[in-house]
Amino acid sequence: MPANTTNAAARDGAAVPDGPAAVPDEAVAPLLRGITVLRRLTEADGGALSLSALERATGLARSTVDRLVATLARMDYVRLDGRDVHLAPRLMELGNAYLAALRLPALLAGRADALADELDESVSLAVGDRDGIRFIHQATRRRAMSLSFRIGDLLPAERTAPGPLFAADWTPADWHRWHERRTADPRDDRFPALPPREHASADAEFERRAARAAVDGWALDDQLIEPGLVAISVPVRAPGTGWARGTGWAAGAGEVAGAGNVAGARDMAGAGDVEGAADVAGAREVVGAGDVARAREAAGVGDMAGAGEVVCVASVVSHTSRHTAPDLRSALLPRLRAAVAAMEDDLRTAPPAQPGPPPAGLAVWTGASKQELGREFVESLARGLTVLTAFGEGRAALTLTEIARATGLTRASARRALITHEHAGLVAPAPDRTYALTPRVLSLGFPPLSRTSLPEIAQPHLTALARRVHESAALAVLSDTGDEIQYTARAAGGRVLSARVTVGTRLPAHATALGRVLLADRPDATASPVLRRVREEGHALVDEELEAGLRAVAVPVRDRAGRVVAAVNIAMHAARGTTEECLTRVLPELRHTADLVEAELRVAGRFCRVAVV
């Protein structure tokens, strides 16, 4: 499993106990600078900055920024639009490596989604990241008043419901780091996902919440983040000792009393209701001191080590116009506990992870890119980032030799990259001489990119296609009724006479190339000779059927499961070539564009829902 975060830059939200740690002598400086560029882009509105703004945000020389950006663009981790730098969906493969190694989203997301549907409320899964919490799954309700938190967002523990449940297992050193961070950043400016704190809260209050959470096995957020927002949380436990390394917080997490197995904690306390038990009254006299261990002892619940390790926290999030904080406890807590119990059953019965194939040919690719681009390509940055992609499902903990073999790097290069990533808080070593990714990997672009839609993925590729063939290009989806298409993105071809269809336009599906490609994927398509042919050939050509002079050719766009979710087309005037020339000149370019969109859709959709409109 990915490991607990051990080092971090203060800008990424967690405390650095004695100021910024000294950079190790063997750290790769260009790799550290590249990580800084990615983090500043992640923090920026919309995941984009101009080159000049990026220069100011990083404090790096403009020539250095240009070379780093050129390298990241070569890797398809960013894209340049004029003088603006945008995060690109391919960058999500780094966060995907962490989430795949963690396994929790793949195993538990279905339960979280089902609970969200049952309650008609937002449900999240989070792991601890030093003195904060970081989201690994979001099942958000679509409402006018909806949550803006994203997968990968980092929040301060004291302003959340999951925070006290993680803090219940903090060591004195953890509490010391938390106090230092609170002193250095009283407004929570290091947490860009949150509005700044308006009113300071006493440290002792969070200590009391943590001690109470250790006893009760659940925790509440009553408008701590902002007015109107409420949440209730219950920890999820897993059997054995191998999961804690994937949670982003301390091993020994099984000591949180009552978490995930509240009934057992109550039995141990000798009370049917922990809230009303006489033993807990004694515990609450201790709580004010912030001494979680003594609170557990006073409650009589012991260390609960046999209950398994806490691997993440499940939360139900609402607002006060729907539920008050007491209402969350009385109405939603029982159903949240039932869902958590089902999650724990899933973890107990989950088969061992089966490692997939590691990435191949990365070192060869970086070497070839260096030869082609020369000094504009920072090979040490590219090689350092590829080290993170060596991890994944079934490859959660790797030795130096395994990482070098997976990436094609020499042991010396892989070792220096690991030293650099450890300094940046992205990997953590273990006593068994293995390394694992930490939750902080999600700080590299994942939050803004996790909300990327299919039109946003397709737009730059449509623009590039239109420039290459000098014709209009578009993306469309099938309407809910199935008899119309809706245009969701387009790029003009730059001609005086061109197809000018605006985004949002609807046209009859059967009369358009886009529509026929979409209809051909439906189960009943074989009943139509036209659609059967489209399915067999993999494209549709419509010649002046919708409008005189208008010719269009379209191909499908498929998701990770192979389903056709959209179609892309080129539309042109029929006088600009024969249908045969259209198929020989335009269709290959169109297929190439669809391949690029599908590749980014597969990366973006691995752990996130990608909206098609």
Image (tube, grey):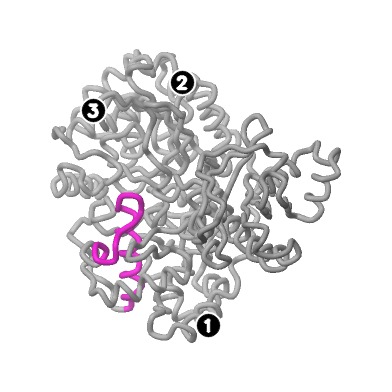
What amino acid is labelled 1 in the image? Ala
For label 1, the SS is helix
Which image quadrant for residue 598?
Answer: bottom right
Q: Which residue is mark 3?
A: 287
**Residue type at mark 3?**
Val
Would residue 469 be found to the left or right of residue 157 on screen? right
Among the two numbered marks 2 and 3 on one chain, the one whose residue lies closer to the N terminus: 2
Q: CA distance from mark 2 to mark 1?
A: 64 Å
- Contact flag, marks 2 and 1 (Cβ < 8 Å): no
Q: Is residue 332 visible?
A: yes
**Circle nearer the N terminus (1, 3):** 3
Q: Residue at x 53, y 65 (%)?
A: 390
| Crowd around label 2: few <14 · some 14–19 · many ≥20 (10 Å) | some
**Residue range of the region highlighted in magenta in the rendering:** 26-54
Q: Position of residue 481 (x, y in %)?
A: 65, 29
Camera-nearest residue between 296 and 42: 42
**Vertical order, 567 against 399 (above or below):** above
Residue 498 image-quadrant placement: bottom right
Residue 269 placement (x, y as % from top left) = 40, 21
Front-most of residues 102 and 72: 72
Q: On the image, numbered disc 2 is attached to which residue? A: 267
Tag 1 residue: 368
User: As drawn, is 502 to the left or to the right of 279?
Assistant: right
> Is residue 60 toward the left or the right of residue 503 in the image?
left
Identity of the residue drawn at 53% across and 44% down: 488
- Magenta stretch: includes residue 27: yes
Position of residue 288 measured from the top left corner of the image (x, y, whole percent): 19, 28
458 up-or-down from 613: above or below: below
Image location of residue 205, percent across then percent down: 20, 30
The kind of residue tagged 2 is Asp
Asked whether the viewer can see residue 301, the reply is: no
Front residue (pair 406, 500): 500
